[in-house]
């Protein structure tokens, strides 16, 4: 009698990633997290989807040309430098009953260096700017300009001491206007910002609730920025943050925490919380202790002239928020899902500018550094568009193809949903080698909702999925067999 060998059937197992968790650039990475990604979001959570694209806004400027766009409340200010000329325009939205009207005013048009706009805000429904006007021999006068009919100029040289290049910020707070200047906080008279009222600290020798007030705090250097959060002014220094208490004179300043914000244009309010960049990373503040929610973000701004990276000194504005996301450098934080992602336009890093009238504004800087030719930069300004298609990609973690004493053989199945997809590609890296294309679609054949990917034997592999246009990725299934010990 012959006995046939008894075989143990190797069962197939399935592991499914159907909940994506965004970017994780640390060494340890979990299922559903990306080691790298660009222009993807979690708006279709738990699936991953693609961000809207951006359209060109205005002309690109070369060489020494610059754009800067800032917004507060219902006003957006665009500064454009071209050669030795500077133009500053303001777009203002005014609400009237159920309708809104948009108007534009020119704040300045002339030579660079003769007018420097430091900050602005809407005070009593009117645009107010703080600026420096050139006199002679590198001397400037400090002025508030109230853009009503006619415009009103208010000289503030008697109490504002900082010069151009230093931080002087403006904040409307109810019936008061606040100027942040060095180590001082200047609070205006109640409903009156004329010159003589800024230093009216008493009436007939007595302080009353209407009076102006000046607060000086020498600890930890100069104030860097301020924001009105939940009807309380919050002020930052490099290593500390403070809250202004009170509605009338006397106001008092109380310290919140020993974490600060050295980067004024990183402050934004999103989904009811305050976000800012400290020297530790991005902090989230909700009225208690600020919480660190990122690594120490290195903002990208490579300048061939200086061979260094310094986003703040060159580009100034690099953070803002919309109704859901906080944008800082090329990073995006989803306040709903608590996940990070990245965005780029082409191969260029982006510099967020502002969120205004439901549109996102940002710019890119492309450097030309061809050997034997003079280097120059091209600055382009973009505005979000729900019809523009963006290029996107994400890269998974490393998948290991072995257990102790056992070998694993895998097959992948990736599930897609086509929205405005025009291109799709899947690449695989085996054993930390280069990525090779295993599937591509360019719109000439039927769109396949499930794409199988067969893997040759390896010790570990990594997957990169990329494309153009709105797409939803619902899952990545890994079907595998474990070979015998």
Image (tube, grey):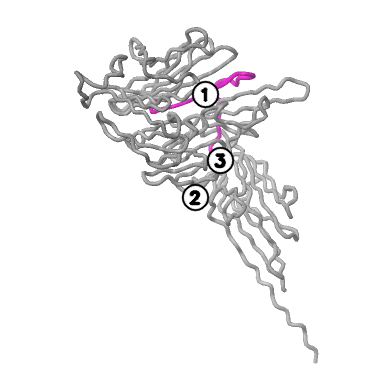
Q: Is residue 235 above or below residue 339?
A: above
Residue lying at 51% horizontally and 34% vertically, measured from the top left? 386
Front tag of 1 and 2? 1
Q: Which mark is residue 395?
A: none
- Image position of 422 (left or right of 458): left
Looking at the rendered structure, the secondary structure element under dot 1 is strand
User: For mark 3, does the 10 Å Cα neighbourhood hold few (<14), some (14 to 19), or many (20 or more) residues?
Assistant: some
Q: Secondary structure at mark 3?
A: loop
Horizontal relation, residue 347 to residue 2: left or right: left
Question: Which corner quadrant of the image does residue 207 belong to?
Answer: top left
Instruction: Please tell me the numbered disc located at residue 45.
Output: 2
Residue 338: x %, y % from top left = 48, 48
The answer to which image quadrant residue 211 occupies is top left
Task: Judge by depth and name the residue closer to the eye, 477 or 201.
Answer: 201
Q: Is residue 56 magenta?
A: yes
In the image as oriented, which residue stretches furthest toward the top?
Answer: 136
Report x, y in % for residue 267: 45, 35
Where is mark 3, residue-wise? 297
Label 2: which secondary element: loop
Q: Does the rendering let one see residue 484? A: yes
Left or right placement of residue 215 versus residue 436 in this view? left
Circle 1 packing at 10 Å, graded few (<14), some (14-19), many (20+), is: many
What is the x, y in percent for residue 301? 61, 31
Q: Which residues are magenta?
A: 51-74
Q: Which residue is mark 1?
A: 68
Q: Nearer the viewer, residue 458 or 108?
A: 108
Q: Earlier in the sequence, mark 3 or mark 2?
A: 2
Q: Nearer the viewer, mark 1 or mark 3?
A: 3
């Amino acid at each position: 009698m012959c006995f046939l060998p008894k075989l143990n059937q190797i069962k197939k197992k399935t592991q499914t990633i159907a909940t994506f968790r965004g970017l994780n650039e640390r060494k340890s990475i979990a299922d559903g997290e990306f080691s790298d990604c660009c222009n993807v979001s979690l708006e279709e959570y738990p699936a991953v989807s693609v961000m809207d694209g951006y359209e060109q806004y205005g002309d690109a400027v070369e060489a020494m040309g610059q754009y800067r766009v800032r917004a507060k409340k219902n006003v957006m200010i665009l500064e454009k430098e071209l050669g030795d000329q500077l133009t500053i325009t303001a777009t203002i939205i005014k609400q009237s009953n159920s309708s809104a009207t948009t108007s534009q005013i020119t704040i300045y048009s002339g030579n660079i260096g003769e007018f420097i706009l430091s900050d602005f805000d809407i005070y009593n429904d009117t645009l107010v700017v703080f600026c420096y006007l050139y006199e002679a021999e590198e001397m400037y006068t400090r002025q508030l300009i109230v853009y009503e009919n006619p415009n009103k100029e208010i000289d503030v040289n008697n109490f504002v001491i900082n010069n151009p290049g230093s931080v002087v910020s403006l904040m409307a707070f109810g019936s008061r206007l606040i100027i942040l200047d060095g180590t001082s906080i200047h609070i205006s008279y109640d409903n009156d910002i004329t010159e003589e009222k800024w230093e009216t600290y008493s009436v007939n020798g007595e302080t009353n609730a209407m009076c102006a007030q000046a607060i000086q705090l020498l600890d930890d250097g100069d104030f860097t920025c301020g924001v009105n959060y939940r009807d309380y002014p919050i002020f930052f220094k490099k290593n500390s943050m403070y809250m202004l208490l009170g509605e009338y004179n006397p106001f008092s300043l109380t310290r919140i925490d020993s974490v600060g914000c050295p980067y004024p244009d990183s402050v934004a309010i999103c989904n009811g919380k305050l976000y800012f960049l400290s020297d530790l990373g991005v902090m989230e503040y909700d009225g208690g202790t600020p919480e660190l929610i990122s690594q120490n973000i290195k903002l990208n701004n490579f300048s061939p002239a200086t061979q260094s990276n310094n986003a703040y000194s060159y580009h100034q504005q690099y953070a803002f928020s919309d109704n859901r996301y906080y944008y800082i450098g090329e990073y995006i934080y989803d306040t709903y899902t608590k996940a990070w992602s990245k965005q780029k336009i082409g191969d260029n890093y982006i510099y967020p500018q502002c969120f205004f009238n439901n549109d996102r504004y940002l710019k890119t800087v492309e450097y030309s550094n061809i050997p034997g030719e003079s280097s120059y930069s091209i600055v382009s300004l973009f505005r979000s568009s729900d019809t523009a298609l963006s290029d996107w990609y994400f890269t998974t973690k490393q998948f290991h193809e072995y257990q102790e004493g056992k070998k694993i053989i895998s097959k992948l199945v990736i599930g897609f949903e086509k929205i405005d997809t025009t291109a799709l590609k899947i690449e695989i890296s085996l054993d930390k080698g280069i990525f090779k294309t295993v599937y591509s679609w360019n719109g000439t054949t039927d769109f396949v909702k499930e794409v199988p990917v067969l893997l040759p034997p390896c010790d570990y592999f990594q997957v990169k999925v990329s494309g153009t246009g709105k797409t939803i990725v619902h899952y990545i299934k890994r079907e595998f067999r474990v070979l015998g010990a």
